[in-house]
Amino acid sequence: MDIEKEIYDYMNYLIIERQLSSNTIDAYKRDLYSFFNYVKKKYNNITKEDIINYIKYLNSELNPKSVNRHIVTLKNYFNFLEKNSMIKINPCEDITGLKTKKSIPRVLSEEDIDKLLDINPTNAFEYRNKAMLELMYSSGLRVSELLNLNVNDIDFDLNIVRIFGKGSKERIMPINEIATSYLYDYINIYRKTLLKNKINDILFLNSRGEKLSRQGFFKILKEIAREKGIKKELSPHTLRHSFATHLLNHGADLRSIQTMLGHENIETTQIYTHVSNNMVKEEYESAHPRSKKE
């Protein structure tokens, strides 16, 4: 069998059995082709030394987080081959990922969130932007989840949004009244202006009546932040991180936040306790009259 056939079979497995998203599958495919282009060998001739040398090469080109993504891809792929008796020896059996420092997510203060969401929309684009940002902060969606929403994923009777997250896992999140109000106006009054006579169910559209891209969302977010005088560095996940941190600050249970964010592991959610503690410390040091030496 050739590499093309093996990768094709593996991609089908990821689609049918694992039900991974198309973005994740594309990333797996790119990583595998990158590896086989490097080693220039067939899958059944790969050795542990090949894997180690490839990791060394990647480590000279990429950051540890990206290297670890490649390692996970290779481990999963060769585990699949071993499980299906396509190889006798798994070259990734004892391979481990690189140690990385856990980065603290960037979040906005509640004051900066108020500034960011202080949008008084007058046209279709502004209503779209207002509805997007309010929904993200209301429900803690990932950017990919937000942009993959369809119109019928919003239930105005129950004030909920139906989200299909990683691995196509469904979760239901409540929407607050402000987000619901602007979503209703956007969908029922302004969205048809952006459709450009096209027919689709995508919730958030760009100027061509197509699905808004991550790059498009990031550009909108940065522009609004600049207009509002917010100088903190933002990422597409900033509203999600802020959502979780602010819930924690106001007494929400960590397990509940885990469920709302769609995290499989509580350890992933615990990073927000560090953010919350840091924010409390900053507030204390800026406000307490004896927090600094004279």
Image (cartoon, rainbow, N blue to C red):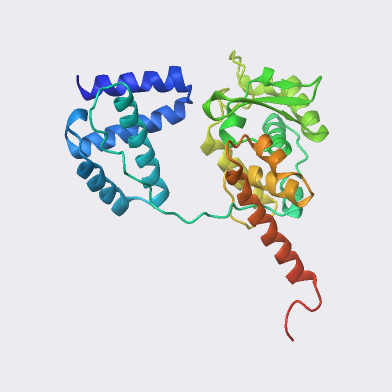
Can you give x and y, in whole percent of width and height, for residue 178 in the image?
Answer: 81, 35
Judge by depth and name the residue closer to the eye, 241 or 135.
Answer: 241
In the image: residue 189, left or right of residue 65? right
Which of the 4 image quadrants contains residue 204?
A: top right
Residue drawn at (68%, 31%) of the image: 128
Can you give x and y, in whole percent of width and height, for residue 36 in the image?
Answer: 23, 34
Above or below, 15 against 271 in this view is: above
Can you give x and y, in whole percent of width and height, for residue 91 in the image?
Answer: 25, 37
Judge by depth and name the residue closer to the eye, 78 or 140.
Answer: 78
Classify the position of the N terminus by image quarter: top left
Can you give x and y, in whole percent of width and height, for residue 185 in the image?
Answer: 77, 25
Residue drawn at (35%, 41%) of the image: 71
Decide if residue 230 is in sight here.
no
In the image: residue 53, left or right of residue 157? left
Judge by depth and name the residue closer to the eye, 84 or 182.
Answer: 84
Q: Residue furthest bottom?
A: 294
Classify the position of the C terminus by image quarter: bottom right
Decide if residue 236 is in sight here.
yes
In the image: residue 176, left or right of residue 66? right
Judge by depth and name the residue closer to the eye, 226 or 91.
Answer: 91
| Callout count | 0
Residue drawn at (56%, 32%) of the image: 144
In the image: residue 157, left or right of residue 40? right
Which of the 4 image quadrants contains residue 134?
A: top right
